[in-house]
Amino acid sequence: MPKSRKRPAKKRRALVPTTIRTPTDPRHVVSDRATATSVDLAEEIRRATADTVAHGRLLLTRDPTLATLTHRREAKGDGRETEPGEWWPVALVEPVNYRLLQFDDLVYPLSTAIAGKLGLAQAQVGETPPAAANWEFHDGPRCELVDPTGTVLARFRHAIDPQWRAAAETSGTVLVLYGGQLGVRTPYGVTAAEYDDRARDAELQAALAGGELLTGAVTYVQN
């Protein structure tokens, strides 16, 4: 009788570049590692934490709940402008290289997973964001989001906004929103004129509805 032949081991499928919503959108970076070993994952985490370049936007909202978050500064019903102390200072933070990994059919959002492990929470519609213990938001010509280990997770340049700063000084905290598509950068293939406040709000709400948005009330530090 002929000896039975041993079947060759099945090859592991390599990581395949992908994005969550927009395949040609350069705002997402996906690892091109060939295997998914623990060594590879450790290297990806190292690269993700070392890459701190981000885009950001500083906004003001009267209500500390995500249900009413808006890019527009609304006036009171009597026409009087809202006092800075009644505004909640908001910082939208989008990593330039928002990293995703794909394991077979599973897409793993590495950038937000790291921030979540360090204490930012998944945003919930209509709920006041929880305090992010030991996180800090440093305000200056170069804004920095600092995690509990004292490491800068993201940094971006932004013009100083006196109204935003007054609100942040009054509250002592900043509502930080962190994710890959939060209405900050103009999407690939969209003109700046098309990407107005309504389009920005729609993108932010889509991230919220899709569970792709992390948040936290972060201690404010003025540089």
Image: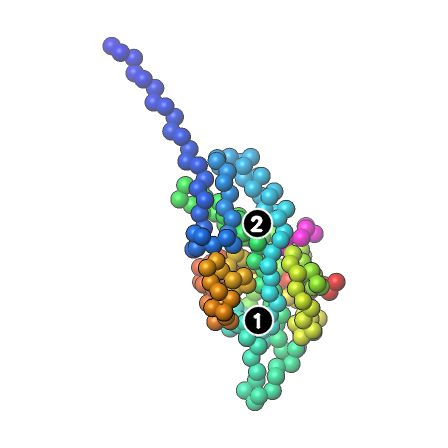
Separation of marks 2 and 1 at Cα, in angstroms: 25 Å
Numbered circle sitting on residue 35: none
The residue labelled by disc 1 is 64
Q: Position of residue 42 (x, y in %)?
A: 57, 39
Which span is picked out in magenta? 147-154
Q: Position of residue 155 (x, y in %)?
A: 65, 56
Instruction: Find numbered disc 2 in the image and state the secondary structure of the residue it sits on.
Output: helix
Q: Quadrant of the N terminus?
A: top left
Locate residue 134: give its quadrant: bottom right
Q: Is residue 18 part of the magenta span, yes or no? A: no
Pointer 2 and pointer 1: residues touching (CB < 8 Å)?
no
Q: Residues within 10 Å of mark 2 (few under 14, many from 20)?
A: some
In the image, residue 27 above or below residue 43:
below
User: From this viewpoint, which residue is outermost toward the left?
Assistant: 1
The residue labelled by disc 2 is 114
Q: Main secondary structure of the magenta part?
A: loop
Foreground residue, 172 or 143?
143
Q: Position of residue 169 (x, y in %)?
A: 71, 71
Amino acid type at circle 1 is Pro
Q: Residue at x 58, y 43 (%)?
A: 45
In the image, residue 157 above or below residue 197:
above
Amino acid type at circle 2 is Ile
